[in-house]
Structure formats: structure tokens, C-alpha cells
Image: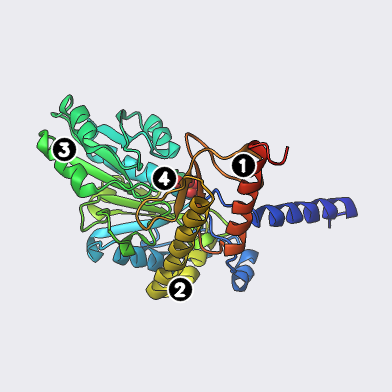
Amino acid sequence: MLDHQQQRRLDDLFDAMKAANESFLGYPFAKGFSYESLWRFMNFSGNNVGDPFGPETYRVSSRLLECEVVEFFAGLFRAPPSETWGYVTNGGTEGNTYGLYLGRELYPNAVAYFSRDTHYSVSKAIRLLRLEHVVVRAEPSGEIAYEDLAQQAIRSRQRPAIVVANIGTTMKEGKDDIKKIRQALHDVGVEEVYIHSDAALCGPYAPFQTPRTPFDFLDGADSIMLSGHKFFGAPIPCGVVLARKQHVQRVLQTANYIGSSDTTLSGSRSAYTPVILWYAIRSLGIEGIKRMFEQCVGLAAYTVDELKARGMSAWRNPSALTVVLPPVEEYVRIKWQIVTQDVSHLVITPGTTKAQIDALVESMTIDNRRLDGHIL
Ligand SMILES: Cc1ncc(COP(=O)(O)O)c(C=O)c1O
């Protein structure tokens, strides 16, 4: 039982998180979702330990639904059904690490390539796995520079390549075309290539974008990951990683303690996040996901128009949800929790409202006027 002061601390924390949730536009996390009907599951020590598709000793798990989640994304990413495997991860970082792990087990002598605009989780995984690597130039759009990839790969053309393709870079939502990556490497004589698609944000909607960037299994990916808490939104971070079964078989170990194969990176895994993702995909369906994406695209286009109409240079990649702009002032950055590197960005996720965009544009305009000396 909490005393009055402790209860107060919880209430204060709740109020602070609620207020922060209403004023962020710089991170790719959905808002306004509701999973209240799943609260009853929180009374169990749910744990999906081990391979979701294998036998289990511990049955306080949601592995049946986890398998359905994996199968749903395998279908969306045009994977050959009997040749693909996957699981629900703790997030995008685990998915990237897993993809690179499979690549390294297939090609221990490989050189890893990824663009300068790649998420920091990739260089962390590269360090963990002790992979030799080369950072490739990125175009201003965020897309990898294919000629630079080819130039860099010439030096190690005798060795296999492991490439992380960005299916939406973190800052600009630039996309790398995995067919062009394979072609660039083939042209300089690199024949053994493993491609991991990092589709953290865009995975759920990349299949519906026009133009559609080649990124999935039919296009030639060996593994793909997406984050569950980004486009769908989830109260607990999560993700999905999928891979060709033949690669997974190489890392499989038997674990008697759990009565299952040890194919996943984490041992104990959440039983709640698979239920959350299952609930999201089943309640939305493909048509619902498309609709949600189209609403976001409409609002992203509106955001660019509104900013440009006020003289600010804002842009986005074709049908992207990320609006890129020059670094914003500190006041705006703090108020709207906006990430700023060489550029700032806004991400128009499900649940973002026109009223929030209007308020942001207004606060940027006021700030500009102040800087121009109109207010000060
Ligand atoms: C492109 C990309 N990959 C990977 C990640 C890592 O995802 P997570 O934060 O779920 O570990 C992110 C997170 O923002 C990302 O933008």
C-alpha cells in the first residue's frame, strides 16, 4: 500500500507524462491509441521465452498470437511462407542486431556497409558483433549514395558484403533501394551479399507508398525489422524481426530449460507486446493501415504547405511522414520535443492532429518574428 506522498508522486508523474504526450512532434511514435481492453492480461507473469513457433514448457504466454503477428508481416513483406521465420522483439535495436547477427553467421568474413544517415543502433550492433565496416555517403534526401557504395566495395570485392538498407532514415525518412544496392555491388564484383532492411518506422506502410521503394523479401531482403511502437503506437516498446529460415537455422541452439529452441536474442520476452501488436493489426486490417497512412500523408503535406506559406523551407521525401526543416529555435525544440541534428524534423504519426500542427506553426512564427526584432 502506498502512503499519501508516494501516491502523489505517481499522480505527478502521470500528469507530467500526459502533458508531454500532448506536445511531442519530433519522434515517430503514434498517439491516441487505446489498448484498455488488454489491461486484464497485466495480472500474469506473461513470458514468451524461446522460439515462438516451437514447443513450450512455460504456457503463460501469447506465442500463438505472436506467430500470427509474424505471419501477418511476412505476408505484407511478400515472404515465401514456409521459408520465413520471425519473432516480436523489444524494439528496433534488437531487430537490427538480430539481422546483422544472422548476416555475420552466414558470412563471418564480411564487410558491413551502411550509410552515414543510418540509426545509431546499427553501429552499436556492428561493434558488438565485431564486424569490419564502412560508412557510405548519403544523398541530401537521406538515400544511400550507390556510387559511393560501389567505390567503397571495390577495395574489398573478394569479401562478402552485409548491407543495412534504410527503409526510412531516422531524420529524413530517406529510403535505400535494395535492388540498386545489389546491382551496385554486383557491378564491382561483390557476389555474396546479405541485406537487412531497417524498416523501423515505415515497415507497416512502405508496401503502399508510391513510388514504392524495393525493400522486401521478394525484392531480395534477407531480413527485415520494424518497430511496433512507432507507426502503430504501443505503451511498451516492441518490434518485429523477420528472416529467411535458412539463416536462422544456422544460429539455432537447443535449450532444455525452456523446452524450446533458442533462436531469439533475448531469453525472456514480453507476452504483452505480441498481444498489443496482434490487437492493432487485427482491429485495423490492411485497409485500416492504408487509411491511417493516407491520413498521415495528408497532414504531412498540409504541414509542409503551412510552413512554406510562412516563408520557412520545409520539405519531405515522396509520400513520407517526416517533415524536414532547418534547425529550429531552442524554444520550439523544447516545447515540441523536436530532434535536431544538422536539420530538425517533425514526424506526422497516427494521432497527430491539425490543431497540434497549427499550434506548432504559430509558435515558430512567433519565434521568427521575435528574432526579426518585431516583438523584442
Ligand atoms: C531507422 C531506425 N532504426 C532503428 C531504430 C531503433 O529503434 P528502437 O528505438 O525501437 O530500438 C530507430 C529509432 O528511432 C530508427 O529510427
Residue appearing at x 45%, y 59% in the figure: 301
Q: In the displayed structure, does residue 49 sit left or right of residue 208?
A: right
Query: For the residue labelled by badge 1, is the local secondary structure a helix, a strand or a loop?
Result: helix
Give the mark, 3 or 2, whose residue is nearer the N terminus: 3
Amino acid type at circle 1 is Asn
Q: Residue 204 versus residue 270: which sits nearer the camera?
A: 204
Determine the CA span between mark 3 and mark 1: 46 Å
Whether residue 266 is visible to the viewer of this picture, yes or no, is no
Real-space Cα separation, disc 4 to disc 1, in angstroms = 23 Å
- Please, what secondary structure does the residue beneath circle 3 have? helix
Label 2 to label 4, Cα distance in Å? 27 Å
Left or right: residue 82 versus residue 367 is: left
In the picture of the structure, the residue carrying the numbered disc 3 is 185
Q: Which residue is mark 1?
A: 368
Q: Which numbered mark, 3 or 1, is in the foreground of this view? A: 1
Q: Residues within 10 Å of mark 1 (few under 14, many from 20)?
A: some
Q: CA distance from mark 3 to mark 2?
A: 39 Å
Q: CA distance from mark 3 to mark 4?
A: 25 Å
Residue that badge 2 annotates: 284
Left or right: residue 78 compared with residue 256: left
Quadrant in the picture for residue 370: top right
Q: For numbered disc 4, what is the local secondary structure?
A: loop
Assess whether mark 4 and mark 2 are in contact (beta carbons under 8 angstroms).
no
